[in-house]
Amino acid sequence: MKILRAPLFAASLAIALLSGCSSAYYGAMEKIGVAKRDILVDRVGNARESQQEAKEQFASALEKFIAVTKVEGGSLKAKYDQLNDDFKRSEARATEVRERIAAVSDVSDALFSEWKKELSAYSDRSLRDQSQRQLDETKRRYNDLMRTMRAAADRMDPILGKFRDQVLFLKHNLNAQAIAGLTSTASNLQGDVSRLIEDMEKSIREADEFIKSMKTS
């Protein structure tokens, strides 16, 4: 299986998706020996990596958020800048997760549509039935994976919302009272981030299992 990690492939993918030419991109890749199945496996791997990175970023942002509420003294502007930087990094990671999940969905639609159409080309009914069962099982595993990935991704938005609110409030109220007000939010965020990490880890495990099954089936 060919792995599509190079910047050239990433750039080609971005151009193809932005211009609405996914089918042309997949066709071009097949001409050089890269099937939709390979692209799907690669994109699931990319989505898995982005969720791992998002998990680590959200955990780091929470740790720094809590640290800001506990450290007395120091520049309030510096504390705001630190929290704002972490918020922006977390927001960027969340966007990347959603984009990579969308890329998985795009190629899976093309793969499953092509697979279904090609079933009619079989002359051997036994082989056609076997391929149909493989298609059904692959779609079942894929749908389970996407539900888990999307559920984990959906947990990011409420956390980002709370984080954004506190960063904005601190920006508009650079005083000790505003810092003190972050403490209760930090406690709530701890629970939210813990649940996010659990969901992300579940999604990562399922992605690993899906990739393994696609390589062996």
Image (tube, rainbow, N blue to C red):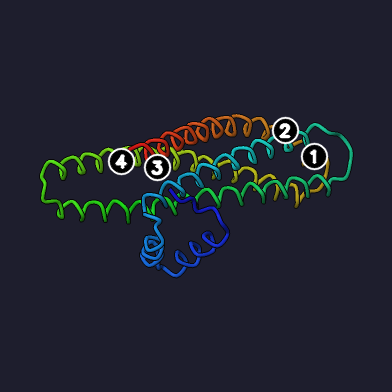
Viewer-nearest of discs 2 and 3: 3
Per the image, the residue denoted by label 4 is 138
The spot of residue 163 in percent (x, y) is: 65, 44
In the picture provided, is 164 more to the left or to the right than 33? right
Residue visible at 26% across and 56% down in the picture:
114
Q: Amino acid at mark 2?
A: Thr
Look at the numbered disc 2 and give the secondary structure of its residue.
helix
Per the image, the residue denoted by label 3 is 146
Residue visible at 36% across and 64% down in the picture:
27
In the picture provided, is 137 more to the left or to the right than 55? left
Disc nearer the start of the sequence (2/1): 1
Disc nearer the start of the sequence (4/1): 4
Report the disc number at residue 177: 1
User: What crowding class fits label 2: few (fewer than 14 Cα within 10 Å), some (14-19), or many (20 or more)?
Assistant: some
Q: Are marks 2 and 3 in contact (CB under 8 Å)?
A: no
Per the image, the residue denoted by label 2 is 183
Q: Amino acid at mark 4?
A: Thr
The spot of residue 137 in percent (x, y) is: 27, 38
Viewer-nearest of discs 2 and 4: 4
Residue 78 visible in the snapshot = yes
